[in-house]
Image: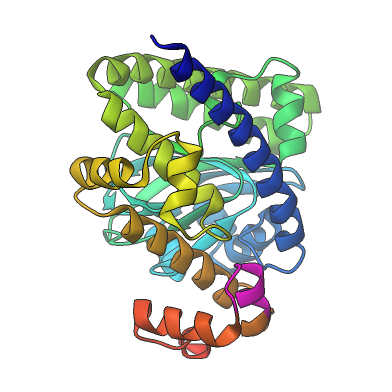
Amino acid sequence: MPPIYYLCKQKSAIRQLFIRATLYNKMDNMTENLRHLTLGQLKEIIDRNDVAKMNSLLTENLGVTMKVTKAVLGSFAHTPLYLPEMRLIMVRRGTASPTINLLRHSVEAGTLMFFAPHSIVEANNLSDDLEGEGITMTDDFFHLTVGDHLPPAFDGRQRDFRLRLNARQMAYAEELLHLIYQSIRTTECHAQVTIHLASAFLWYVNNLWQQQQQREQQGFSREQQLFTRFIALVNEQAATHHTIDFYASALCLSPRYMGRLIKEVSGRSAKEWIDDAIVTGAKVRLKHSDRLVRQIADEMNFPNVSFFCKYFKRMTGLTPNEYKHRDI
């Protein structure tokens, strides 16, 4: 391989590290004013929807639900939600088509979904019989469970993933989740019991993820891998970087080649993907924060509030204020 290829790869890796550091600094500032779907808010929702029927327990750093239904998830349907903590959800029955960090997915019974901290999720097409279970935890609790040895699936490189579990794998994962639930509920259990059970659950999911990765990598072309990197970068940077040139440079590609590649792999243009991410980020800020439209326009690197309003109206058919005050 020519030396220039390795140089480009090295520069790209350094640029990615800088981009991620910048992103999390901006995210820290943003979260001060956003209202998110936090553990505390989940507890309020669960309290309103009959804890006994949902079989859910939430502490300051950890939440486990053994039964979540459309009745609960439906209250969040068709509006983007910012998730500050990591979440793992298993679908026991029913179907849905959530949009997760820009990409639309179809999920059914036997699907396990992972959402990394700072993911943006929109619940769509929830079937009436939808039922699942899951766990959510803060970064502090996560690091207590794994210590210094991070499972590769949860080392920060994956913003989300989905696993298709067979009946045996689903039953084993459910049993681990049930043990975590019981350890929180039982006063005889020391906190270390819960921590180690959560660690076992995460490592089991990690093993399933690694097996799936090996199967997928064998069938992934270089173009598909570049598209995956492009989507990850757009998810991280679209709030402040709106041009194709920025993403092409970050991937060490020419804008023309990148545009053609994205179109061939996904059927959509690179600009459409970037616009989707910008609009989704704007919707989250408008619907789930107290910031003024001009503050959001400035935060998202628009030249002025008028430009932002025209852009948002062109993309959604609504002005920012119309969207902000529209009933979900």
Q: Residue 271, position in %: x, y?
A: 34, 59
Seen in the picture, residue 12 relative to 146 is either above or below; the reply is: below
Residue 328 appears in the rendering: no
Q: Is residue 98 left or right of residue 303?
A: left
Q: Residue 2, position in %: x, y?
A: 41, 11
Seen from the viewer's position, the closer of residues 192 and 26 is 26
Q: Residue 70, position in %: x, y?
A: 38, 61
Confirm whether the magenta stretch covers residue 296. yes
Seen in the picture, residue 298 relative to 134 is either above or below; the reply is: below
The residue under the point 42% across, 43% down is: 248
Q: Which residues are magenta?
A: 295-303
Q: Quadrant of residue 162?
A: top left
Confirm whether the magenta stretch covers residue 117. no
Q: In what quadrant of the picture does the C terminus appear?
A: bottom left
Q: Is residue 89 left or right of residue 137?
A: left
Residue 223 appears in the rendering: yes
Q: In what quadrant of the picture does the N terminus appear?
A: top left
Q: Is residue 306 left or right of residue 137?
A: left
The residue under the point 34% across, 85% down is: 317
Seen from the viewer's position, the closer of residues 237 and 151 is 237
The residue under the point 52% across, 71% down is: 282
Seen in the picture, residue 212 relative to 12 is either above or below; the reply is: above
The residue under the point 43% across, 79% down is: 311
Seen from the viewer's position, the closer of residues 163 and 259 is 259
